Image (cartoon, coloured by chain):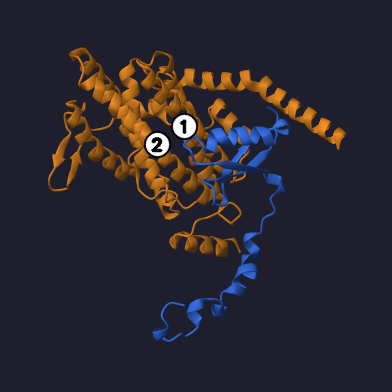
Amino acid sequence: MSKSNEWPLWEVFIRSKQGLNHKHVGNLRATDAAMAIDNARDVYTRRQEGVSIWVVESVNVAASSPSESGALFEPANDKIYRHPTFYDIPDEIGHM
Amino acid sequence: MSEELEQLFQEKIDQDIKIEPKDWMPERYRKTLIRQMSQHAHSEIVGMLPEGNWITRAPSLRRKVALLAKVQDEAGHGLYLYSAVETLGADREDTIDDLHTGKAKYSSIFNYPTISWADIGAIGWLVDGAAIVNQVALQRTSYGPYARAMIRICKEESFHQRQGYEITMTLAKGSPEQKEMAQEALNRWWWPSLMMFGPPDDESPNTAQSIRWRVKRHTNDQLRQEFIDMTVPQAEYLGLTIPDPDLKWNEEKGMYDFGEIDWEEFWHVVKGNGPCNKDRIKARKAAKDNGEWVREAANAHAEKKRQQENKVA
């Protein structure tokens, strides 16, 4: 198959059971969304791994870049006051 | 600049931080992974052929559904791995074509024929057994997508080995002729299974770098030894004899000593002269060529549907 005809790539998300999030499990190639769901059924749920499938064409996923990760995530490092253990509560109070 | 990046990269590896697709990586790391992972993917795909040979002749419905499910799993494993190779920037169609032109290798074991039903038992027990030892180790490989594919594959692979052992056990406990079939299959597959772990460490020039990058976590010889120590008692339980007169327990080392592997045979098969090399590639090429019109039709159908939807909108 010539490259221009290569089927597009789809990201696959599976909900493993009711009450849980859809979780990214991998990707596959398919001509359209319906085929992507059919193929995802065969490739990613052969052992009852799922009750629901989402597929998103990979070109539509916007992602942060590893080079930005400092600017994005480091500001959280020194904000320990966002965690419960930052606050002193007397033992007599018990669990809070 | 690049030296600094390489040092940061190695520090991450040393701290067991996984490398993900968009992270900086040395070009040699990328190339090593593309080579190793695509070989692995091709092995899953070519591995369907020797077993597919027996689907229509499986001795019972129970054996047939199990073998069908196993072969389908191998296809799935190939797909997980081709996806993971793509994350390294390798084009999927090029990767597959490299198999067909002989540029890329696959596990030599699949160049041996499956001449009796007992071979299906031996493949599940020994070949999948060896693959599991290798793949369990690779679950901790440094490249994230490869490690994740391995975790998924290992979960599915354990049924493969169990169904193979069960087939072999049924034959080993059957009539004398059936037991003989099981023994002959063990004789055929034992040495090629040991060769699956690759050349000995002192002849494996890339091992040291792969270990440093934590692409590999153990050497070929370590994994081979692990497989032998695990498998010998399983053969004893079946009353079958491993075809190696030098095989014996070494009390001092706490492991089995074993005989010389015929590396000449290994290289002979790797270089394309095994019993089935040509048939395997021919079958894979035919599958791609004969499926071409289906893939094109699917593209045309999707395009037509898109146009219809646009019209309605």
Q: Residue at left 61%, top 32%?
A: A38
Q: Identify the element where label 2 is drawn.
A: helix
Chain ID for orange: B
Q: Quadrant of residue B245?
A: top left
Q: Looking at the rendered structure, which numbered label has been put on residue B39?
A: none
For the C terminus of chain B, the quadrant is: top right
Which residue is disc 2 drawn over? B157
Q: Nearer the viewer, residue B172 or A4?
A: B172
Q: Nearer the viewer, residue B216 or A28?
A: A28
Judged left or right of residue B31, residue B124 is: left
Compared to B209, does B111 lie above or below?
above
Give coordinates of residue B36: x percent, y percent.
48, 41
Q: Nearer the viewer, residue A5 or B102?
A: A5
Inspect the image, locate mark 2, and give the three-letter code of the amino acid beneath it: Glu
For the N terminus of chain B, the quadrant is: bottom right
Judged left or right of residue B49, residue A8 is: right
Which residue is disc 1 drawn over? B73
Q: In the displayed image of the protein, which residue is found farthest to the front? A: A93
Badge count? 2
Inspect the image, locate mark 1, and give the three-letter code of the amino acid beneath it: Asp
Q: Residue at left 19%, top 40%?
A: B256
Judged left or right of residue B249, residue A88 is: right
Q: Identify the element where label 1 is drawn.
A: helix
Label whose residue precedes the other's in the sequence (2 or 1): 1
Q: Quadrant of residue B126?
A: top left
Q: Residue at left 59%, top 73%?
A: A76
Give coordinates of residue A74: x percent, y percent.
60, 72
Chain ID for blue: A
